[in-house]
């Protein structure tokens, strides 16, 4: 079992807590703030050291792309309700502290999460305002899949994915709304919708 410095343990604990509460890893700025306002360079040094020790894996050139490998720090299993997702115009990412344990009923585990839908842009796919969508955490998706997309590293939206040569279209499932088109580098996939839960 690798040994960690106090700072490295703090980074691991913060990344784990953020993954459990929000379903995505923290940014470098968020880690720096949690550690008392240290520099981003220092945060990168700690992350690289943790990577060398096999504690984490990072995907290069992606924001919020930290996966914990050390079993001692892997986020607890379950399906957290991590916030609200826009089905209209993108909104600033938000988080809540509500736990919904659906693993035994839905057969999903660590890495899946729930989002509550706000808006009506996906109603033709039977995803309505107030529904919960069950999301498989992934960074890739096929054309036509309904995805959780992060736009410009901070806004999150729920849309169908379509790729063109140099751009990404995020298409609503509502005939009264227009697709949103972004340069490919401004859109990151955070997950693919696997189910919808609705209160009757």
Image (spheres, helix red, strand yellow):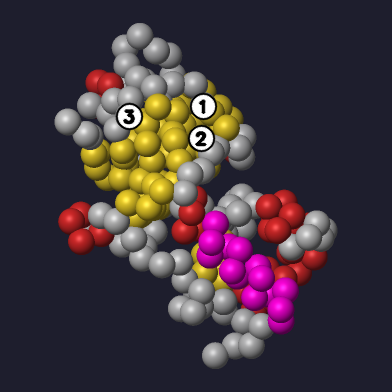
- Secondary element under disc 3, as helix, strand or loop, is loop
Which residue position holds label 3? 130
State left or right for residue 44 relative to residue 101. Answer: right
What residue sits 41% from the left and 67% below the top?
Answer: 76
Task: Check residue 88 for magenta coloring.
Answer: no
Q: Which residue is mark 1?
A: 90
Q: Earlier in the sequence, mark 2 or mark 3?
A: 3
- Within 10 Å of disc 2 (Cα), the crowding (few <14, some 14-19, many 20+) is many
Q: Quadrant of the N terminus?
A: bottom right
1 up-or-down from 155: above or below:
below
Mark 3 surroundings: few (<14), some (14-19) or many (≥20) residues within 10 A? some
**Whether label 2 touches label 1, CB < 8 Å:** yes
For the point 49% across and 21% down, which residue is it?
89
Q: How far apart are the two marked residues, 1 and 3, measured between alpha carbons?
A: 16 Å
Residues 73 and 99: in front is 99
| Separation (CA) of disc 2 from disc 1 | 6 Å
Q: Position of residue 156 (x, y in %)?
A: 51, 35
> CA gap, disc 2 to disc 3?
16 Å
Percent coordinates x, y for residue 139 in the rendering: 46, 50
Tell me which segment is drawn in magenta. Answer: 5-18
- As drawn, 144 above or below 30: above
Q: At x 56% / y 71%, what residue is drawn? A: 56
Query: Which residue is the extreme one toward the bottom?
Result: 1
* 20 relative position to 63: left or right: left
Q: Which mark is residue 156?
A: 2
Q: Main secondary structure of the magenta part?
A: helix
């Amino acid at each position: 079992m690798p040994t960690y410095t106090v700072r490295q343990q703090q980074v691991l604990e913060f990344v784990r807590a953020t993954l459990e509460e929000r379903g995505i890893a923290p940014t470098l700025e968020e880690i720096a703030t949690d550690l008392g306002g240290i520099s981003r360079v220092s945060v990168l040094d700690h992350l690289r050291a943790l990577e060398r020790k096999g504690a984490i894996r990072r995907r290069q050139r992606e924001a919020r792309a930290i996966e914990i490998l050390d079993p001692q720090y892997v986020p607890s299993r379950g399906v957290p309700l991590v916030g609200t997702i826009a089905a209209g115009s993108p909104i600033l990412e938000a988080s809540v502290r509500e736990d919904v344990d659906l693993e035994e009923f839905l057969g999903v585990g660590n890495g899946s999460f729930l989002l509550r839908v706000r808006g009506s842009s996906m109603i033709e796919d039977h995803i309505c305002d107030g529904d919960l969508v069950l999301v498989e955490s992934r960074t890739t998706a096929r054309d036509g899949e309904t995805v959780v997309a992060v736009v410009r590293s901070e806004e999150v939206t729920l849309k169908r994915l379509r790729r063109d040569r140099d751009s990404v279209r995020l298409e609503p499932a509502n005939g009264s709304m227009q697709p949103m088109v972004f340069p490919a580098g401004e859109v990151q996939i955070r997950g693919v919708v696997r189910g919808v839960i609705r209160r009757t």
